[in-house]
Image (tube, rainbow, N blue to C red):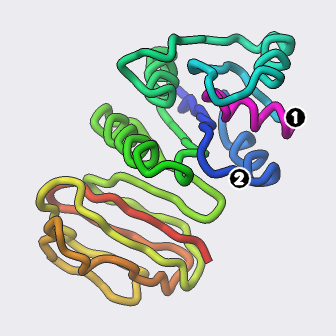
Amino acid sequence: MPVKSVLIVANGQKNSKAFLTRLIKETDFVIGVDGGAGVLLQYRLKIDAAVGDFDSIGKILFKKLRDSKVPIRKFPADKDFSDTELAVRIALKSGFDKFILTGMLGKRADHTLFNISVLLLLSKMNKEAVIKEEKEEIYIVKNSITIHTNVNDTISVYPITMRAKVAETKGLKYGIKNKLLKKASTLTLSNVAISDKVTISVSSGTVLIIREKQ
């Protein structure tokens, strides 16, 4: 069966119309999360569903959203989950296996951290998931991953678990081999890609891979 993919657009840093258009072409379904739905409306891009309490979209854009006949799942402001997590949980129930999240970084540090934690939720459910922004990408890895890069991209490896062991890396200026990573160490901050792809293999624990594009 083909993999069903979903793009979830939140209200973090605003990416360009061209970038969002490329992401939409990579996915089968687009969910706008609160103000993220407003961004898609302003760009006149595809929206298949909108989710959130809609406290950050503004009255005019929310009226346009309702008038557009896009299916809306509106939640109260007082709730146990963030709008982004609600959108992800709805997508999980709909059977999506591949998740691209965007508009997840910037603006507020608390939202950024909790949006990254949604990747961990998806990883635990064995779903393919990534945060993609115009200048950054974030992956959670517990086995092996190959990332397409540009030469001189900055690649950082951060242990999500208290300890994580990197078995081997390929395509990095400072290679890592059989290295135990611990929290509160900056050893694997700001490595550099020397190839058009980077492979990172993890033998234990879970790591966050952050790619800053050049």
Q: Is residue 73 magenta?
A: no
Q: Which stretch is magenta?
A: 31-43
Q: Is residue 38 magenta?
A: yes
The C terminus - image quarter? bottom right
Q: Quadrant of residue 39?
A: top right
Horizontally, is 190 left or right of 54 in the view?
Answer: left
Calculate the distance from the C-alpha at mark 2 to the C-alpha at mark 1: 14 Å
Horizontally, is 69 left or right of 2 in the view?
Answer: right
Front one among 96 and 13:
13
**Main secondary structure of the magenta stretch:** helix
Question: Considering the numbered disc 2 on the image, is that residue within a helix, a strand or a loop?
Answer: loop
Q: Position of residue 33 (x, y in %)?
A: 61, 29
Up/down of 213 relative to 118, above or below: below
Q: Amino acid at mark 2?
A: Asn
Residue at image position (32%, 42%) is 120
Residue at image position (38%, 48%) is 113
Up/down of 70 relative to 8, above or below: above
Q: Amino acid at mark 1?
A: Arg
User: Which numbered tag is attached to residue 44?
Assistant: 1
Q: Which residue corresponds to mark 2?
A: 15
Q: Are marks 2 and 1 in contact (CB under 8 Å)?
A: no
Horizontally, is 200 left or right of 96 in the view?
Answer: left
